[in-house]
Image: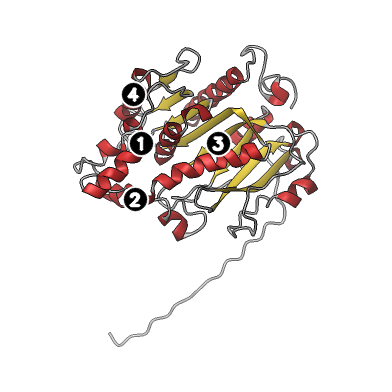
Amino acid sequence: KGGRWRSTHCLHVEQVWVQPPPHGFNPDQYICARLWAKAEDGALIPISVLSRRSSIATATKDAADSTATTTDTDTDTPDTDAATTSSSLPRPLPSLLYGYGAYGACTEAGWDVERLALADCGLLHAVCHVRGGGEMGRRWHEAGRRESKATTFSDVLACVSALVEAGLAEPTALALEGRSAGGLLVGASLNLSPSTFAAAIASVPFLDAAGTLQDGTLPLTANEWEEFGNPNEVEGYESVLSFSPVHNVVSGAAYPATLLLPALNDARTGFWEAHKFAHAVRSNGHKHAASRPVLVCTDMESGHFRAADPKERASQRAKELGFAVAALRTALGLDLESGGLDNHKGLCAGDP
């Protein structure tokens, strides 16, 4: 009381003079681009795309830059009203699409060795920045939550259409991936158009939205109502039920080869949700079940954030991506033993 306060502010300035590249990584071997998909309501959905330059025979960096914004992830909406197309990207590639679209979270298209490995195998990797996420600000989140949640899933299909129409993605060899709330994105998108994808991977997936969100005794349910809606209310129930994956499986549809990866000790998404979805698909006359199985692999030790051991996590991830590559090879009519997807032949055979 009656004393003085002294405050000292220190400004630390850091400057990177040299950025050593990761071992064996040559950025000139890859192409990164920003495309825009036109949604049903006219909104433009950003898509971050990565592929290996050698997979696109006639592509050049200048040509790619002239038709798409590069990896500087600015969020300004383009003046165009249609998806970006480019004659410099002529041959469609087998593709893995990733999406999350919830909680206002921003899915960054940063450097990732997994994505590079997929590109080295001849795949196109695309991050779909759908509504429900926060990539385009608060309104982007609001446009994909509660009663508007279904917008998230229709945005995914808009991204698929844009990639196919641009000649980037092979329409018969598309895979979709998501985890946690991104698992909801996967399940709901499959229900909207089961035959669009050849493969799907959903880790610790939120698939029984209508059932789980009715249980107020679960630790996170009350908070989830703000994001997905409250099915204990009349309007909320109709909304949640309309997109809950377990409750909207299409009877007799040709679902893709699907790998569901719940965790027994997951306190956020119950392991039983994946089993319920798998049972719903299998019991509703899933076509091509022999060649496109719906598999559930429950982690009996880990929780929501996977195994703590890096080697075990890497092993799990390799199996997931291996499943996707195998499913895409099958969709393309390629021999699983003879190689990967680069140029539609060779599984990363030889030096990339």
Along the polypeptide, which appears first: circle 3 or circle 1? Answer: 3
Along the polypeptide, which appears first: circle 3 or circle 2? Answer: 3
Residue carrying label 1:
206
Q: Residues within 10 Å of mark 1 (few under 14, many from 20)?
A: many
Residue carrying label 2:
147
Instruction: Judge by depth and name the residue closer to the eye, 310 or 222.
Output: 222
Between marks 1 and 2, how big is the CA–CA gap?
Answer: 17 Å
Circle 4: residue type: Ala
Residue carrying label 3:
97
Q: Are marks 1 and 2 in contact (CB under 8 Å)?
A: no
Along the polypeptide, which appears first: circle 1 or circle 2? Answer: 2
Residue carrying label 4:
280
Circle 2: residue type: Glu
Between marks 3 and 2, how big is the CA–CA gap?
Answer: 25 Å
Task: Give the left or right position of residue 329, taking residue 56 as reference.
Answer: left
Between circles 4 and 1, the one closer to the viewer is 4
Between marks 2 and 4, how big is the CA–CA gap?
Answer: 25 Å
**Rendered-image quadrant of the C terminus:** top right
Q: Position of residue 173 (x, y in %)?
A: 60, 26
**Rendered-image quadrant of the N terminus:** bottom left
Instruction: Judge by depth and name the residue closer to the eye, 178 or 20.
Output: 178
Between marks 3 and 4, how big is the CA–CA gap?
Answer: 24 Å
Between circles 3 and 4, the one closer to the viewer is 4
